[in-house]
Image (cartoon, grey):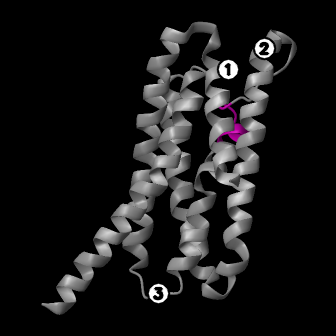
Amino acid sequence: MIEANAYAGQFLTILFMAVALGMDAFSLGIGIGMKGIRLLDILKLSFIIGLFHILMPLAGIFTGGYMSSILGDVTVVAAGGLLILLGGHMIYSSLRGDAVPSFNHRTLWGMLIFALSVSIDSFSVGVSLGMFNTDMMMTVILFGLFGGLMSVLGLLLGRRVSHNLGEYGEACGGIVLLAFGVMFLL
C-alpha cells in the first residue's frame, strides 16, 4: 500500500514536470506557428521536439547529481540566448522583407535549433532527477509525450492566429520568442 502511494506520488510529480516542460514547447510553438507553418512541418517539428524531450532528460539523468549545480544556470542562459537570437532574427527579417533570409523551421538545422531551445531545460531537470531514485522510463516517456503534444497544440494555435495577422505574423512570432528568451534570462 505504501509503495503504491509512493509510485502514484512520483507519477503525479513527473506528470506535472512534463506538463510544465511542455508549456515551453507550447508557448514557443505559438511563435513559430504565427510565422506560418504547414501541417507536415508541424508533425515533423513536434516529433523532433518530443524526441529531444526524451533524449535531453535521459542525458541529464545519466549525467547525475554532481553536475546539477554547475549546469543548472548554464542551460537556462543558453536557452534564453538562443530564443533571443531566433526571435530577434525573425523580427528583423520580417521588417526587412525579402532582403534577409529568415529562420527556416522547415530545414533540419532549423528544426534541431528550435527543438534544442525548447528542450534544453529538460536536461537540467533530468540532472536533478538523476540524484533521486526516479523511474527513468516513466520520466522520459511522459516528458517526450507532453513535449510533442504541447508543441503540436502551440504550433496549431499559432498557425490559426497567423491567418488573422497576415504579414505581421512573423514579427509577432519573433516578439513571442524574444519575450520568452528575456524571461529565461531574468
Q: Give the image location of residue 39, x and y in percent.
A: 47, 25
Q: Give the image location of residue 126, x and y in percent.
A: 54, 73
Q: Residue at x 49, y 11 (%)?
A: 163
Q: CA distance from mark 3 to mark 1?
A: 43 Å
- Residue situated furthest bottom in the rendering: 2
Residue 132 within the segment the image draws in magenta: no
Which residue corresponds to mark 3? 132
Which stretch did the figure color magenta?
A: 105-111
Q: Residue at x 34, y 71 (%)?
A: 13
- Residue situated furthest left in the rendering: 1
Find numbered disc 1 in the image and state the secondary structure of the residue it sits on: helix
Type of residue at label 2? Answer: Leu
The earlier-in-sequence mark between 3 and 2 is 2
Q: CA distance from mark 3 to mark 2?
A: 48 Å
Q: Residue at x 17, y 91 (%)?
A: 2
Q: Is residue 2 above or below residue 120?
A: below
The earlier-in-sequence mark between 3 and 1 is 3
